[in-house]
Image (cartoon, rainbow, N blue to C red):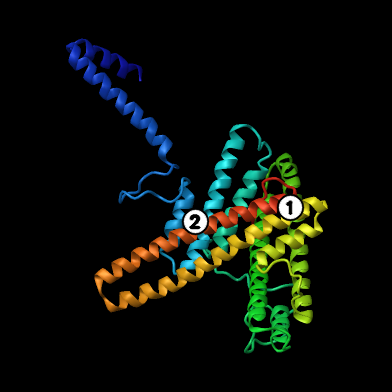
Amino acid sequence: MTIFSVMLGSFLRSLNTNLKCFVVAVCYSVCVMAGKYSREVNEQKPGGDGLTVEFRIGKLNQVWEKAKRMPLSPVRQAELHSDLKIQEKDELQWKKLKAEGLDENGEKEAQLRRNFNVILAKYGMDGKRDTRSVENNSLKDHDAKEGDIFDDPRLDKLWNKAKSSGKFSNEELSSLKKEFQHHRDKIHEYNILIDAVSRTEEIHKNVISPLEGDAKEPELHKKHTDLKQKMRDLNHGFERLRKLSHEGFTEDSEFREPRVIELWEAAKRANLSEDELDSLKEELHHFETKVEKHSHYQEQLELSHQKLQHVEALGDKEHIRKTQEKYNTLAEKTREIGYKMKKHMQDLSSKISGQGLNHNEL
C-alpha cells in the first residue's frame, strides 16, 4: 500500500490540476465501491435479473430459491416464506443483541441455529430422507386401513370413533378434523425438534475442551426442559381431543381455531391473574379473526393455482398472463398475512410463557 501511495503521488505531481482532481475522484470511487461490496454480501439487493431478492440474509435467500424449484404446493410454499420471514426478523434482532454484548453465552445464537434446522427439516430441505413419521410413544400394532388419515394409531382410533358416534354435525366434524390435523402436525414438528436437539448433543459429546463442554451444559439442560414442556403440551392437546371426541363441543366454547384454542388452554394453565386472562382472551379473539383470514387466503390461493394450471393447459398466452398476475398477487398477499399471523402468534406465546422473545419452533 505504501509503494502504491508513492507511485500515485509521483504520478499526480506530473499532471495538471484538472487531471489530478479526476484521478483522485476515480480512486475514491473505487475505494467506496470496494467497501460497499463487502457490506452487500448479506444485504437485500437486486438479483441478477434486476429483481429485488426476498431476504436480507444470504442463507435464507438460498433456501427460498431452492424451495421455488421444489414441488411444494402453493400453500406450503407460502408457509415456508412466512417461517423464513420470522427467522429473518429474529436473526436481525439477534445481531443487534450480539453487537451490544447481550448474548455472551451464545444461547440465543444456538436457538436460532436450531430453529433454522427445524425449518429445513419441516419442509424437506435438510438433505435427509424424512423418516420421522408422525408417531407417539405407543406401539403401532395395527395395519393401516381405510379411515386412517393421521398416520398415528391413537389419533386414527379416536377420529374414527368420533366420526361414527353421531354426536357431531358436519360443521362440527370439520372443526374437529382441523384440531386433529393440527395435533398431528405438532407431533411431527416435535419429532423434528427432537432430531435437531439430538444432533446438537452429538456435537456436544465431541467437544474437546472440558471447559467448553461445561459451558454448554446449561444450554442442553434448557433444551431438554423445553422439550419436556412441549411434550406436556402435546399430552394436554391429546386429552382435549379425547374429551371432545367423547363429549362433543360445548355451548360455551371460547374459540374455534386450533392454534387459538391451544394458546387459550396454555394461558389457563399459566400463572396469570383474572385481569390478565380477560385481556388475553380479547386479544385472542382478534388473533382468531387473523387466523381465519389467513385460512381463507390459503384456500383461495389453492383454487387460484388450480385455475392457473387449467388455463396453462389451454395455451391462451394472454389469458395465462392475466391469470398468472392474479395468482402472483394472491400468493404475495397470502405470504404477507401468514407472516403477520405467525408474528402475532409468537408475541402471544411470549406473553403466556413470560419468557420474552419466545421462538415458535413448533
Residue position for label 2:
336
Q: Determine the secondary structure under disc 2.
A: helix
Task: Report if residue 271 is visible in the image.
Answer: no
> From the viewer's perspective, is the residue at label 1 or at label 2 nearer?
1
Q: Position of residue 100 (x, y in %)?
A: 62, 31
Work out whether 245 lies above or below 103.
below
| Callout 1 touching callout 2 (CB < 8 Å) | no
Taking 349 as reference, is 142 above or below it? below
- Crowding near the residue tagged with mark 1, few <14, some 14–19, many ≥20 C-alpha atoms within 10 Å: few
**Real-space Cα distance between discs 1 and 2?**
26 Å
Q: Residue at x 64, y 49 (%)?
A: 111
| Residue, disc 1 | 279
- 178 left or right of 53 in image: right
Please tell me which residue lies in front, 128 or 253. 253
In this figure, what is the number of numbered marks? 2
Residue 1 x %, y %: 35, 20
| First along the sequence among labels 1 and 2 | 1
Q: Write the residue at 73% across / 61% down.
A: 264
Hey, what amino acid is under mark 1?
A: Ser
The image position of residue 115, as x and y in percent, is 61, 54
* Amino acid identity at mark 2: Glu
Query: Which of 89/70 is in front?
Result: 89
- Tell me if I can see residue 102 in this picture: yes
Residue 322 pos. (x, y %):
31, 66
Is 227 on the left-hand or right-hand side of 16?
right
